[in-house]
Amino acid sequence: MRILLLGLSLLFSSFTFAQATDDNEIWIDQVGDTLTLYIDQIGFGNKIGADDFSGSADYMDITGASLTFDLDFIGNQNLLFGALVADSSSYTINFTGDSNELDWSIGSTGSADSSNYNIAVTGDSNTWDIDQGSAASAERLDLDLALIGNSNIFDLDFEADDATWNFDITGDSNNINTLQNDGADAEITFVLVGDSADIDINQISGTCASQTTGCSTPSGIIDMEVDSDNATIQINQKDSANDS
Amino acid sequence: MQQFKSTKKIQLTILSLLVISGVSYADSIGDIVESTGLSSLTRQTGEEFEVSSTSIPSVELFDRAETKNGRMLIEFLDKSELALTEHTRVIIDEVIYDPNPDKSKMVMKFAFGTARFASGVTGQINKNNIDISTPTAQIAVRGTDFTTTIDELGRSLVILLPDEFGDPSGTIIVSNNAGEVTLDQAYAATMVSSLDSTPTATVTINNITPGIIDNMFIVNPPKEVREDIEESVEQEIDSGLLDVDFLEFNELEQDALKDTEVNLEYSELDIDFLEADFLRDLLDVIEDLDKTMARLGDRQAQGSGDFTLRGATIGKNNDSQYNIFVEDDGIVFYRDVQGVIRLKVQLGSSVKIDTIVEGYEGIIDLDGGDDSLIVITQE
């Protein structure tokens, strides 16, 4: 068993905001089980992983099982990109700041079962894109997201069985696009407080909408509570292939 | 009185189309064919249209017709006529035109002043489905021409008018929580003072014509009605302690929940989770949908704030299969058919919910639906 403890505390002064994304770069390449990864990123313009996830380089490739991530970012314009293959892993992520960007693919080349996320984001204009289960359907996924801030863009695509999400979104002009795909027993509880939101909730499969083919155990649940003016919300609950 | 040429041909065309297609008509439901002085129509959105010789708005669902120092005559598509004298307000609450008269419906609230209603001669609406209410009484119509005069306290004087031959124009039943009376003679009248007081016994008013019935009856009721009211008062005064029948009162007959808030009427506990209709008859769906699209279907929440719901009602909705109820400070839309959707919208929000599922496509508006749009698709 390998245990790698990586603690990083990065503190930077803030004087060249426009060039902030080049201030610091961390690449991670890790193989092994029971990793516990702590990152405390304080400052702005820091980067973990590659420039973007579309590259072929070995940026933040982490492969293992029973991994624990505890990531704290305080500051603006920080970037986090990467690819993970991780079963039975937990993710505690706290972002405080504006214009941060996260792009993760979990299970991009392998299994990513039994994931447990606790995400708290406070800030404006953050952009998040998380994909999980693209290579193999992930099972037992629990995601809690608390977002406080305005004009954030979140795109969360999970191909997973037995997925349970709890979203608590507070703020105006947030754009949230979620996909629960490729599995049964999908459930999402979504609380929205804030105006001018653009929300897409896609729950594909896990339901049995067709009356012609029948279904013994339709199991998709969407529970949404809205306190908003000028919101546009699209809820798709389908057992077809396409989302919105 | 100034006369307006109504577009009869257009009306007939619209009416014919409605009869042929069976589609409920949700926009214009009638025209103002006569008007004098100051009067107006106020849409549900709050937009007000003054009626004048150069501007004659069409009558639409949920309109509030109101006269100030003027009069107005509205002719509905089924030829029913509603005449308002000065300082009168009528709210057009629900109008459904269906090829089957049994499925057509008309509901209006006479708020105050003096108004006359004559049911249509086309027979397009079953008279059993015409529901007129005043602040203190319900009026069931059976092929009739009648007037109501309502004062500022809501007290309602209802008079059955004769037909062109001087015979009773039909029968109306005036009822409230305390009882009912039937008017079946020309110029038969009853007065209702409150929701919980019995309508006065029927009296026949002499020496009047429909033309003289106006708000003067508020300050000076017809002699026959006044005498009947005075007689009722005297009977109440005569009732001394010895006249009380202490065995007559039965607590068990009281409905303790009758006046409670609407959120006690239907809650999540009332949802029958086995009641979901997975194999709906398509004809039933279309029928329910037609009704949904045309009706007001509003419910006024009490205590937790007022709201208006269009396209659905509080409780179980058979067309959309939404269970709708008030919970805390929000309205919950719960649907458990091939997947569960539970949507809670804050009271005070103006939300349009567009639902596209197998067996139902429809729009539900909460408080106008102007602010937020929620589209629910289930395939």
Image: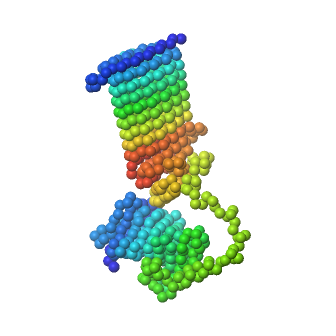
Q: In this view of the protein, can residue A51 be seen by the observer? A: no
State the image coordinates of residue B43 (x, y, percent, origin top left).
Answer: 38, 62
Q: Residue at x 60, y 81 (%)?
A: B234
In the picture shown, does residue A127 fall above or below B143? above
Label total for image? 0
Tell me how the rendering is colored. Answer: rainbow
- Image spot of residue B126 (x, y percent): 52, 69
Q: Is residue B198 visible?
A: yes
Q: Give how far across and how far down residue B56 sits, in percent.
A: 32, 68
Q: Residue at x 29, y 72 (%)?
A: B53
Relative vertical location of residue B94 with respect to residue A34 in this rendering, above or below: below
Hey, which residue is sitting farthest bottom in the picture? B207
Q: Nearer the viewer, residue B312 or B213?
A: B213
Q: Residue at x 53, y 66 (%)?
A: B102
**As displayed, is residue A184 above or below residue B84?**
above
Q: Residue at x 43, y 34 (%)?
A: A147
Residue toward you, B317 or A92: A92
Which quadrant would the N terminus of chain B be assigned to in this image? bottom left
Q: Nearer the viewer, residue B141 or B63?
A: B63
Instruction: In the displayed orientation, state which residue is furthest to the front.
Output: B241
Look at the picture and state if B335 lies above or below B140.
above
Q: Residue furthest top?
A: A1
In this picture, residue A115 sits left or right of residue A156: right
Residue B313 image position (x, y, % from top left): 51, 55
